[in-house]
Amino acid sequence: MLEVLHRIVQEVNAAPDLARALRIIVEQVKQSISADVCSVYLTDFEQRNHVLMATDGLRQQAVGKVTIPFHRGLVGLVCERAELLNVDDATTHPRYLRITETGETSYRGFLGVPIIQHRKVLGVLVARQKAPRRFDDDEVTFLFTLAAQLAGAITHAQATGDTLLNQYGSLDTPSRFLQGRPGASGVAIGSIVVAFRQADLDAVPDRTTEKPEEDIQEFHNAVAHVQDDLRKMKERLSHTLSVEDQALFDALLMMLSGDTLISHTVDRIKKGEWVQSALHYTIEEHTRVFDNMDDPYLRERGSDVRDLGRRILHYLQTDKPRVIEYPALTVLVGDDVSAVDLAEIPKEHLVGVISAKGSSSSHVAILARAMGVPAVMGVTDLPVSRVEGREVILDGYRGRVYIAPPPSVKEEYQRLAKEDQELSEELQSLLGEPSETTDGVKIPLYLNTGLVSEMSSLGTQEAQGVGLYRTEFPFMVRDRFPGEEVQVANYAKVLETFSPRPVILRTLDIGGDKPLPYFPIEEPNPFLGWRGIRISLDHPEIFLTQIRAMLRAAIGFNNLQIMLPMISSVSEVDELMILIQRAHDELIEEGFVVSMPRVGVMIEVPSAVYQVKELARRVDFLSVGTNDLTQYLLAVDRNNPFVAEIYDDLHPAVLRALVQVIDGAKEYGSPVSVCGEMAGNPLACVLLLGMGVDSLSMSAGSLLKVKWVIRSFSRSWAKQLLRNVLRMENPKEVRNFLTGALEDMGLGGLVRPGK
Ligand code: PEP
Ligand code: MG
């Protein structure tokens, strides 16, 4: 049965359209389990009935004509319960409904399996038998597996406007879009260009070489071509991307200049392997290391390496550069779009990005945000191979993709896109305006930067300083710990850029979900493991080097503040303060004119919430890391797509924890900020304002939106809204209420498409 199943699945996948896929299923199922009939009913949500769409065994004329109303018959029952129904004599069942147009005599054996996609019942796959028959477990699971397959085919058909569904009016309307995760906000309408995947490393056959010297030369030539391409891309984007974002290309170029990627390939060729297979195996070896990492940023490095491999292979197979004609409005689509794929498209042509894999923390999403291009990530149902050249709409606010949209949807999105444009022009008028509430409370807005980040001109001009500089990035792109001098240069750059505005450098927050390639940590529960300052305390040499570099970098600027992540006990703060003091004293002894910076801690672990007063007493400021605080309070992995829906920083428990932190900090007169993603969310920032937060820190793209919200509300009104929200019991209620509050102020356009 397994083999039959495998074959049917392959045939269904290869079917050119839904009609063909349905035919394959009904014919093969009927035959494989020796049933008398096999049929597929699809749900028409508008007409509220189930339409017979394919059958083997019933009258063909009935297809498309016979409908079973919602809540009637056994098919209706399967749909209602979203559960299989296996009855040996259907005629005795209280819900039995005899339909004559199908040529049905009295079929007795009945097996109905729901076709479900994303919790929604799209239809029912039915097997019938004239004689009484109870289908056995193997047959039931067989139908189950095929129903799941069918669900994918139906979703693709709905997304691509399949002609079969079009014939039946509203059959496809309820989910005519594919759902992914928002990657970069905004809406776009354009034509699809599928990310180039011509050079297939997996298709390279194993061969040996007779002339290794020639192969090595060929390899070096191909690498040189790719280096050249990357430099050109970097150059092209130099006006769009910040210095730090451009570092991504430097990291790729670094891999191509004398790194193990090159030397391992050359070694393999020297041992007699053919250049193309030597490259294939080296790339595999390298990506395996990254693929096994939990941290999404590092896993992304795996796709970068694979991408480099494909590019080198391309030049090994043809030495001509690739020439692609890009439509004026290009939407880049791919199974796993890389940052380099994106960079390859001339900026004036690129209007959107859609990737079947990845999340909002993928490099490509980060780059898209930095470039102001809407992106939708993790669209798992995306039929990548069938969409080249199709028209598409993407909604980066809600993570939706409409392939071949009907005119009504297109008109609506054209209107929304126009309004979005007007809105962003209105936002520009806020440049340089103070971030102050209508009742005169100033809420300075700071910039989050670091990783692959946005030190864009907007960020550097608009922000009142840096509220969170994540120092992990320079550690992640190297093959060893960066020394003191390298770090001094790095930190001095950001301190100088913002001087005299304050810059908060956060000490290294690696470990657990962010292991360094050269500092392997294997543990069963990384998020609850050796992370952040826990590593710093166990490796004071790493911590002291970093603090020394920070203090030295600040000489002449004096705008440095230091922040400690992942604090869960006061003793950690006491010990780290001693180390900071020690680094300071040693530098003074060595003749450096350094001064003691202000030091703060992040509140991002529940225990820190409950000891906020004890912590506030010990340091100069607090900053709430809502990304981690939410994950630890709700016990939801922040990077896991399977639980992404229940990760919600508007959860009442998170809001109450925040109130406790801010009230606790106030008691000690300690300034308190929020630097998690929540701070940059126009909905959430109203609540933070009401809670009495002193400042907010966010990525560059959120600065003007949040400023607009701050300038539209008074703190007393925000407090009133907060009081209402704190009585609510679930995040959905909170979200709806806040959306309403923003709409009332005319700010709805900040959280959805349109104005
Ligand atoms: C946070 O946890 O909210 C935070 C700002 O830190 P990071 O996202 O770097 O863990
Ligand atoms: Mg954190």
Image: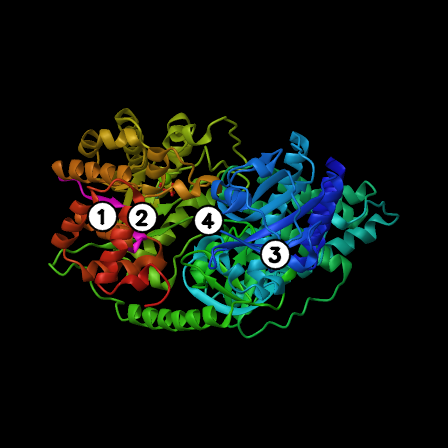
Mark 4 or mark 1, which has the lower sequence index? 4
Q: Quick check: 500 above or below 348?
A: above
Query: Could you say which is closer to the camera, residue 362 or residue 530?
Result: 362
Which of 580 and 515 lies nearest the eye of the viewer?
515
- Quadrant placement of the N terminus: top right
Task: Name the element at disc 2.
Answer: helix
Q: Earlier in the sequence, mark 2 or mark 3?
A: 3
> Residue 283 falls in which quadrant of the image?
top right
User: Which of the two labelled residues, at mark 4 and mark 3, occupies the earlier sequence position?
Assistant: 4
Secondary structure beneath dot 1 equals helix
Indicate whether residue 664 is drawn in magenta. Answer: no
Few, some or many residues within 10 Å of mark 4 (<14, 14–19, 20+): some
Identify the mark nearer the N-term, 1 or 3.
3
Q: Can residue 649 be seen? A: yes
Residue nearest the viewer, comparing 261 with 541: 261
Q: What mark, if any, has residue 383 been given in the picture?
A: 3
Residue bearing the label numbered 2: 678
For label 2, being within 8 Å of ligand 1 is answered yes
Discs 2/3, front: 3
Identity of the amino acid at label 2?
Met
Tell me: is circle 1 under 8 Å from ligand 1. no
Is residue 680 a member of the stretch shown in magenta? yes
From the viewer's perspective, is residue 615 above or below residue 715? above
Q: Quadrant of residue 699?
A: bottom left
| Region of the chain picked out in magenta, as a range | 669-682
Quadrant holding ligand 2?
A: top left
